[in-house]
Amino acid sequence: MAASVAALLVGPAQAVTFIAPLDDTRWELEASKFSCRLSQPIPDFGTASFEHRAGEQLEFVISSPQAELLGKETLIMAEAPPWHPGRGTHRIGMIRDAVNSKSFRLQPPLAKDILTSLYQGRTPALTNQNWYGTDTAVKVAISSANFQQAYSNYQSCVGELLPVNFQQVARSAVLFPSAQWRLSDSTRQRLDLVALYVKNDPSVKTIYVDGHSDNLGRRLANRDLSRQRAEAVTRYLTKIGINEDMITTRYHGERYPVVKNTNSNNRARNRRVTVRLEREG
């Protein structure tokens, strides 16, 4: 296609189509252990991107100051590319109210379906049949030109993502049986994830480890038990490679329950150690 915006005849009306020209289709990859973003600029409209954050699922996003043009109902089709018109077209889905401010955002399974259609050489196209309330349709299409190599590099990035992101480990609470301070296997697994993240994010400068108890027993005994729990967590973190200088260990006994100690379920939630990560700045 010679121009980035084309007027195509659709029945009695015209569809305004935004798509990158075949000879200027670019795929751009932003890669790190924390996120992978594969994007294609769409001239005169915005950017289409596949975004995969560590610990989360794939999202497909169209960012544009004109995103509202896709309207309240958006038809998504996998169309045959211009250079292979016989490949066939199929419907991916119909989406309602997916536009949020200046973006159009889709999660699995539709995001994966769009990615698959590009891998198969088709052209995913998002169409709204009412351009500014008229009978003219608007279409935003993603070119599959040059996609194979870009996809290979993107998959390599996804394979290197951390299993969690900062929001998922910034605040963790591990629980303990009554009158116990030793770490369970599930607690060690959670602390392993916290430590893995910290080792890969140099912006994390401090780890606060706070021990707590329920209100059963004597107050001084509960304070000592909360100390043992906090120190057990700190010992494990240092054992698996976290610099002890990063860790501030505190213990509070029964002073700060997260819920009232009115029943066994609530007391179980209060027998905890919290681990909080703090970034610089």
Image (cartoon, grey):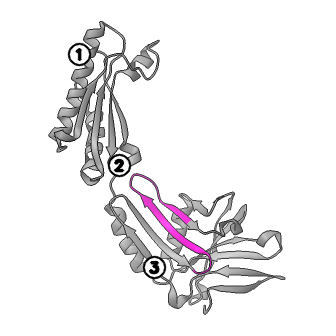
**Residue 122, how many percent across, how many down?**
55, 79
Q: Indicate which disc residue 51 carries.
A: none
Quick check: is 206 in the magenta stretch?
no
Q: Earlier in the sequence, mark 2 or mark 3?
A: 3
**Do the CB atoms of the residues marked 1 and 3 lie less than 8 Å apart?**
no
Secondary element at image label 1: helix
Distance of mark 1 from mark 3, alpha carbons?
A: 60 Å
- Say whether residue 140 is left or right of residue 168: right
Secondary element at image label 3: helix
For the residue marked with disc 2, what is the amino acid? Answer: Gly
Q: Residue furthest bottom?
A: 2
Q: Indicate which disc residue 147 carries.
A: 3
Q: Residue furthest left?
A: 239
Q: Is residue 80 above or below residue 33?
A: below
**Residue 278, how many percent across, how many down?**
33, 43
Q: Earlier in the sequence, mark 1 or mark 3?
A: 3
Which residues are drawn in magenta?
A: 43-61
Point 33% across, 18% down: residue: 213
The foreground one among 88 and 53 is 53
Point 57% across, 83% down: residue: 20
**Do the CB atoms of the residues marked 2 and 1 lie less than 8 Å apart?**
no
The answer to whether one can see residue 130 in this image is no
- Residue indicated by mark 1: 224
